[in-house]
Amino acid sequence: MEILSNAEQLTIDTILDGIAPEPAQPVDGRNDNRLKSDRDMRMLNKKITSILENMSDGFFIIDQKCRFIYLNAAAERFCSEKKESLLGTSIWGKFPRSVYPPFYKYFQKAVLNQSSENFEMYYPEKHKWLEININPFKVGVSFYFRDISERKQFEAEMFRQDRLNLIGQMAAGLGHEIRNPLTTVRGFLQLLSEKSSCLQYKEFFSLMIGELDRANTIITEFLSLDKDRVIKLKMNNINRIIEAILPLISADADENRINININLAEVPDILVDEKEICQLILNLARNGFEAMAAGGELSIGTYAENDEVILSVRDQGGGIADDILEKLGTPFFTTKDNGTGLGLAVCYSIAIRHGAKINVETGAAGTTFFVRFKQKI
Ligand SMILES: Nc1ncnc2c1ncn2[C@@H]1O[C@H](COP(=O)(O)OP(=O)(O)O)[C@@H](O)[C@H]1O
Ligand SMILES: [Mg+2]
């Protein structure tokens, strides 16, 4: 396989010259022509090309003018563009400096110091985390990159579960202690507000009761973060659950002037706690409503894929920025003035109790939350 564009003056031999260590000088001063013999070089070229072309990690080389002079098959796939149209073009067309500042920063560092640089970078266009190695050599710079999204996702999931466990334990211990006295106070306020001597303060009483009710709602949500919460798992069909709470979602949608689009494919029954799944769907739907302006559309869908039943909730909001994406599910994390920051934490907690996974796809056209339930748990 031809490794370099014919248009370029560089050959794989020159590149190898740049990469390979200088051959040791023989003692008697004669040139050691063993490795450099044409046949050896051709064999080595073939071998390296075949390794590069068959590996799942991406690899490309640019010349001193930052033009692609080689891309392996994985890099070609990653760029979603044919090698032929990329060769000879500048990498800054593919990775604009302003869009990928870390990439440019490490590239600059590697070239200035003539050092090899290793770093991790989020590549938003493909929603992927990459581990990148930049290696300058005599006639250009090589880039090696590996998709580490799965590892990153796993780490984030562990981190999220740790946080949830900690808060969940707190919830279990504290929630009831706070809720009980609140209920007593609320009862007395209600009683007093009805006394004729207190009628002039009626407005204050209803304000206090309203605030207590809000606190109670938050505490109830907080309580559902308890990971050891007892849930009632029963074989049920998620489509039926969606249909049952549809009136509630529609009422919310009407209030926000959002259209609802329901797309339910036939899915097998799974073991779920109906109440918890209602809560999960409502929380995701509410976030969707809150992310959109009036006139937007919220789509709720289900489908079966491999051994999973998947629930998806898609909105047409402005999407979620990367720094916020990392924090999703952290209890009390909110970007809203009136938010509690508990909605998603509860969703993740419910998902954990059901052995389900939550994935998010987000972009300028909106956000989709996928909840993936195993068909047999
Ligand atoms: N569909 C969505 N679109 C955009 N941002 C979202 C969406 N869902 C969640 N978020 C972000 O995640 C944060 C946490 O959500 P959540 O836990 O439900 O708490 P709250 O809704 O009370 O803020 C939100 O404040 C918002 O920034
Ligand atoms: Mg919410």
Image: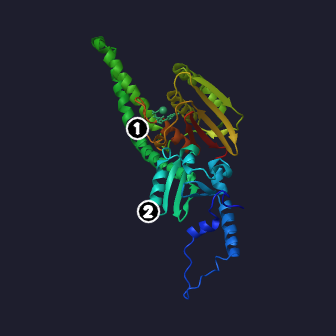
In the figure, residue 36 lies in which quadrant?
bottom right
Can residue 321 be seen here? yes
What number is the disc on residue 175?
1
Residue at left offset 45%, top offset 37%:
223
In the figure, residue 265 lies in which quadrant?
top right
Considering depth in this image, is 324 or 371 the residue closer to the camera?
Answer: 324
Image coordinates for residue 85, horizontal then vertical, percent: 66, 48
Image coordinates for residue 114, horizontal then vertical, percent: 47, 63
CB within 8 Å, label 2 to label 1: no
Q: Is mark 2 on a helix, strand or loop?
A: helix
Amino acid under disc 1: Gly
Q: Is mark 1 on a helix, strand or loop?
A: helix
Image coordinates for residue 209, horizontal then vertical, percent: 36, 22
Can residue 243 be seen here? no
Viewed as shown, does residue 85 lie left or right of 64? right
- Quarter of the picture containing the N terminus is bottom right
Instruction: Name the residue that disc number 2 marks.
Output: 113
Q: Is residue 201 above or below residue 279?
A: above
Considering depth in this image, is 247 or 274 the residue closer to the camera?
Answer: 247
Local crowd size for mark 2, using a 10 Å CA cut-off: few (<14), some (14–19), many (≥20): few
Would you say the beta carbon of the disc 1 residue lies within 8 angstroms of ligand 1? Answer: no
